[in-house]
Image (cartoon, rainbow, N blue to C red):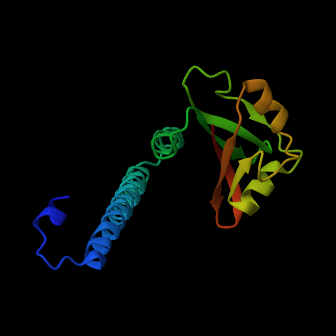
Amino acid sequence: AWLVSQAPENFQPYAAALLVTTAPLMIFAAGLVERYRCNAFLREWQKDQIVSLARDLGMQLDPSHVSKTLIAHGLRLLGAEGAMVALRVPERGTYRVEAVHPPDSPWAGYENIDDSGHVVRIGQAGVLILPGDDPTSPVLPLLAQEGMAHLLLAAILQGTESVGVVPFS
C-alpha cells in the first residue's frame, strides 16, 4: 500500500505485480534456509554424539560398561524408550542380555538360543526395523505382548560374524 501511495505519477503496474509476487518467494526461501539450518544442526549433533560414543567405548574394555555406554548413547540418538544389549556366549551357543534400559527390566540376564536364525538375519542386514523389514519375524508376537509397535535391531559384528544384537524400542 505504501508503495502505491508513494509511487511516481507514471505508475508501473507490472513492477508492483513483480514486488507482490516476490514477497511469497522470499518467505518460501527463508523457510528453506531455516529447514536446511535445522537439518545441518541435527547432523552435526548426531556426528558429535557418535564421536563421543567412539571415545567412550575406546576407553573401556569391560563388556558390561561398554554395553551400558552403548545403550545410553543409543537412547539419546534414537529417542527410544527402551533398549538392551545381547551378546553371544559361544561356549553355550546362546545370546545373553548384558545390559537393559530401563534397569528394572525382567530381561536382564536372560539367555536365548537363536534356533530360528533371527540373529543371523540381523547380522546379514546390519539393521532391521520390525515389523516392516521382516513381517514373519518370530519376535513379532513378543512385541505385541510387550505393547511395542516397532523395534529397531542393530547387529554387533566382529568382522562378518554377528557377536550380538542391540534392540531399541
Which quadrant of the figure has residue 42? bottom left
* Residue at figure coordinates x 68%, y 26% from the top left: 107
Residue 11, position as x, y percentages in the image? 19, 76
* Residue at figure coordinates x 50%, y 45% from the top left: 74
Which quadrant of the figure has residue 80? top right
Q: Nearer the viewer, residue 38 or 137?
A: 38
Q: Nearer the viewer, residue 147 or 118?
A: 147
Image height of 152 relative to 101, above or below: below
Image height of 169 relative to 21, above or below: above
In the picture, the quarter occupied by the C terminus is top right
Residue 146, position as x, y percentages in the image? 73, 25
* Residue at figure coordinates x 70%, y 37% from the top left: 96
In the picture, the quarter occupied by the N terminus is bottom left
Q: Nearer the viewer, residue 159 or 13?
A: 13
Residue 165, position as x, y percentages in the image? 67, 47
Taking the image as shown, residue 7 lies to the left or right of residue 136, namely left
Taking the image as shown, residue 145 lies to the left or right of residue 71, namely right
Which quadrant of the figure has residue 51? bottom left
Residue at the far front: name it: 9
Taking the image as shown, residue 4 lies to the left or right of residue 155, namely left
Taking the image as shown, residue 65 lies to the left or right of residue 97, namely left
- Total numbered circles: 0
Image height of 39 relative to 152, above or below: below
Residue 141, position as x, y percentages in the image? 84, 32
